[in-house]
Image: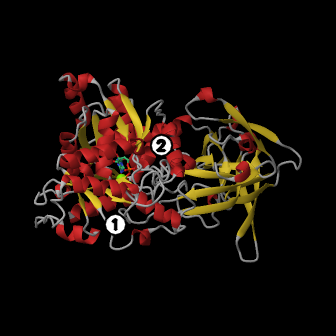
């Protein structure tokens, strides 16, 4: 099933379908993805992106990429470029449909003047603290500012002076004149403009007043021709203000705001503010650290764009708040990688094996299949010789019952190779096993007719003489608590101290020497891996995901506990 089919019946699409059927906007559909360029995009954003861009496609409409850049202090061109790159990676384009709220600053200024002329906006000279005190609470209505009834002329003059830099920050703001007693706090004379004497990444020093988000966002939508303004639920209470702007300003196009629930994931945090704390305080390497839930992070880790879209499709679009198990995202990825990733051998924690009865200078190249159920992916050859590496934990000197791997006197099959038997164990001074001496049965080569003798276990291996040594980075959840946002106190106390394990001496089969940066592999029994794009000389592989979900049980328990509580 493709993403379109899976989510074709969600409520947002139903509304849009009804609107177009009723001939609204002459049947035209236009959406936009409107990030604030104040951080990198995360998986939550992918939900909004897929929704906005896919809907535009389905209704033969258009989707804009619009940067809502009204907050010059926090914004940066670095974020703009990173956001574009993430969108391209997801496979969306915005040819000719790239815009910035700052493109509309002059028009917004004129619209603010329009409101003043209509007696629907005024310059307030209270301090922000005083404004806050008069705003009231959810229970108590607010009170009018003493400046609320300034004359139009005075308001126009003051607003012009605000714009020309006469005043200092905080001396005045422009507010809409709506209703200080409204049960909806957003309608209690919201601020439209504030003075900020900072340069803007796009408009430089042209402005020293900047529009507030709600005003700029609504009117950018309207001016740009948006028909359906899709946003997350926290904007539901802002919708009356959104509509107030549309009713009270001379804009021909009146977009419809529709809210849907945010995507949240367990064992992670998803607000840009929190993610930027992790970056700034050095908990992670950067925004694209492979443990981060950012699109650049998971891309570097090896996630595919297709698996993200598949996941977003499965999550669907509703108004219900929910937190999805990280495991279900990983399963989408596993399903895809299982299909596409060629198999390889890599020994993560090597233990040397000497095959005593194998000739010193002999080597054989054995056929190994690249994929168990896709013969079209062919085979490769892997070298076999007297010295091999196997996984340390595939050997136990005192094996527990049912241990199906190697131990003294026991046989295992080397996958695609021979059956070997452990004859003796070499230890260092501390008693640690450092080498095994084995014998092989030359009549048991896999794939040959006489090689079919059965033994209990099969393990992977590499030739010690041919293997290449690489660093492997193994990742775990970045947080140990299922909902780090919702615990007591600082979310950073729940950071998993073991979220990154670096293996320095892993041994890989020699064909991996030629691995390309964007190639994904299954290292048999160990997970899916891809070269770390940030590593020099391509000597580091990131484990994208393990083969099985070792957290599933823990997540289930966490869910059961939290449903019991509520
Ligand atoms: P954050 O709170 O993570 O900083 P934001 O909402 O401030 O996110 P914006 O840059 O304003 O980030 O978001 C751009 C768009 O992405 C908005 O339409 C917003 O509703 C949507 N969005 C952000 N987070 C999520 C999420 N977790 N799930 C779905 N949509 C989201
Ligand atoms: Mg925001």
Q: Of the numbered discs in the image, which one, if any, rests on residue 170?
A: 1
The reply to whether callout 1 and callout 2 are in contact (CB within 8 Å) is no
- The x and y percentages for residue 226 are 31, 34
Instruction: State how many labels appear.
Output: 2
> Could you tell me which residue is drawn at 47 percent across and 61 percent down?
276
Find out if the beta carbon at label 2 lies less than 8 Å from the nearest ligand 1 atom: no
Picture quadrant of residue 49: top left
Query: Which numbered marker is on residue 563?
Result: none
Mark closer to the chain start, 1 or 2: 1
Quadrant assignment, res 127: bottom left
Q: Quadrant of the C terminus?
A: bottom left
Residue 547 in view in this figure: no
Which residue sits at x=18%, y=40%?
247
Left or right: residue 478 versus residue 114 is right
Q: Secondary structure at mark 1?
A: loop
Q: Secondary structure at mark 2?
A: helix
- Whether 64 is drawn above or below 132: the answer is above
Query: In screen coordinates, is 197 left or right of 438?
Result: left
Residue 271, given in percent of the width and then of the height, sits at 39, 57
Residue depicted at x 40% and y 35%: 64
Decide which of 36, 58 is in the foreground and name it.
36
Residue 184, position in %: x, y? 15, 56
Tell me if residue 383 comes above or below residue 465 in the rendering: above
Packing grade of label 1 (10 A; few <14, some 14-19, many >=20) is: few
Q: Relative to residue 55, is residue 507 depicted above or below?
A: below
Residue 47 falls in image quadrant: top left
Quadrant of the snapshot with the N terminus: top left
Q: Which residue lies under the disc numbered 2? A: 333
Of the two numbered discs 1 and 2 in the rendering, the one whose residue sits closer to the viewer: 1
Q: Residue furthest right?
A: 361
């Amino acid at each position: 099933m493709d993403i379109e089919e899976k989510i074709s019946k969600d409520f947002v699409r139903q509304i849009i379908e009804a609107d177009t059927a009723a001939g609204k906007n002459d049947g035209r559909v236009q959406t936009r993805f409107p990030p604030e360029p104040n951080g990198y995009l995360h998986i939550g954003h992918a939900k909004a992106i897929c929704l906005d861009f896919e809907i535009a496609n389905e209704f033969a409409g258009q989707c804009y990429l619009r940067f809502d850049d009204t907050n010059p202090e926090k914004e940066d061109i670095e974020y703009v470029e990173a956001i574009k790159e993430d969108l391209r990676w997801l496979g969306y384009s915005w040819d000719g449909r790239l815009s910035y709220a700052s493109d509309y600053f002059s028009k917004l200024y004129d619209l603010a003047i329009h409101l003043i002329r209509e007696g629907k906006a005024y310059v307030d000279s209270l301090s922000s603290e005083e404004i806050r005190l008069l705003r009231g609470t959810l229970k108590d209505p607010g009170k009018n500012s003493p400046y609320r009834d300034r004359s139009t002329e005075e308001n126009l003059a003051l607003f012009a002076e605000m714009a020309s830099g006469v005043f200092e920050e905080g001396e005045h703001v422009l507010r809409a004149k709506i209703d200080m007693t409204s049960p909806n706090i957003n309608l209690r004379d919201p601020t439209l403009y504030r003075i900020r004497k900072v340069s803007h990444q796009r408009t430089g020093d042209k402005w020293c007043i900047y529009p507030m988000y709600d005003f700029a966002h609504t009117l950018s939508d309207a001016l740009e021709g948006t028909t359906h303004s899709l946003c997350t639920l926290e904007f539901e209470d802002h919708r009356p203000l959104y509509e107030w702007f549309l009713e009270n300003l001379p804009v021909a196009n009146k977009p419809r705001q529709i809210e849907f629930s945010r995507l949240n994931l367990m064992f992670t945090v998803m607000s840009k503010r929190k993610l930027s704390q992790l970056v700034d305080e050095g908990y992670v390497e950067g925004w694209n650290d492979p443990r981060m839930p950012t699109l650049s992070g998971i891309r570097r880790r090896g996630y595919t764009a297709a698996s993200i879209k598949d996941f977003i499709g499965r999550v669907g679009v509703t108004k219900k708040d929910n937190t999805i198990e990280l495991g279900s995202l990983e399963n989408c990825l596993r399903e895809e990688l299982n299909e596409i990733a060629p198999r390889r051998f890599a020994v993560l924690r090597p233990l040397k094996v000497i095959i005593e009865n194998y000739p010193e200078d002999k080597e054989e190249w054995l056929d190994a299949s690249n994929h168990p159920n896709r013969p079209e992916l062919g085979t490769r050859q892997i070298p076999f010789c007297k010295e091999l590496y196997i996984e340390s934990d595939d050997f136990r000197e005192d094996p527990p019952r049912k241990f199906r791997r190697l131990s003294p006197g026991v046989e295992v099959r080397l996958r695609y190779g021979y059956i070997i038997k452990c004859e003796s164990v070499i230890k260092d001074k501390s008693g640690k096993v450092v080498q095994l001496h084995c014998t092989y049965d030359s009549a048991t080569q896999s794939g040959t007719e006489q090689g079919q003798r059965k033994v209990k276990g099969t393990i992977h291996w590499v030739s010690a003489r041919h293997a290449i040594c690489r660093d492997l980075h193994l990742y775990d959840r970045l947080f140990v608590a299922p909902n780090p946002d919702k615990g007591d106190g600082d979310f950073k106390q729940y950071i998993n101290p073991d979220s990154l394990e670096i293996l320095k001496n892993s041994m890989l089969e020699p064909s991996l020497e030629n691995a390309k940066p964007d190639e994904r592999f299954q290292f048999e029994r160990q997970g899916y891996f891809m070269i770390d794009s940030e590593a020099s000389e391509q000597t580091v592989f990131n484990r994208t995901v393990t083969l099985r979900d070792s957290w599933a049980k823990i997540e289930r328990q966490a869910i059961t506990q939290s449903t019991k509580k509520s």
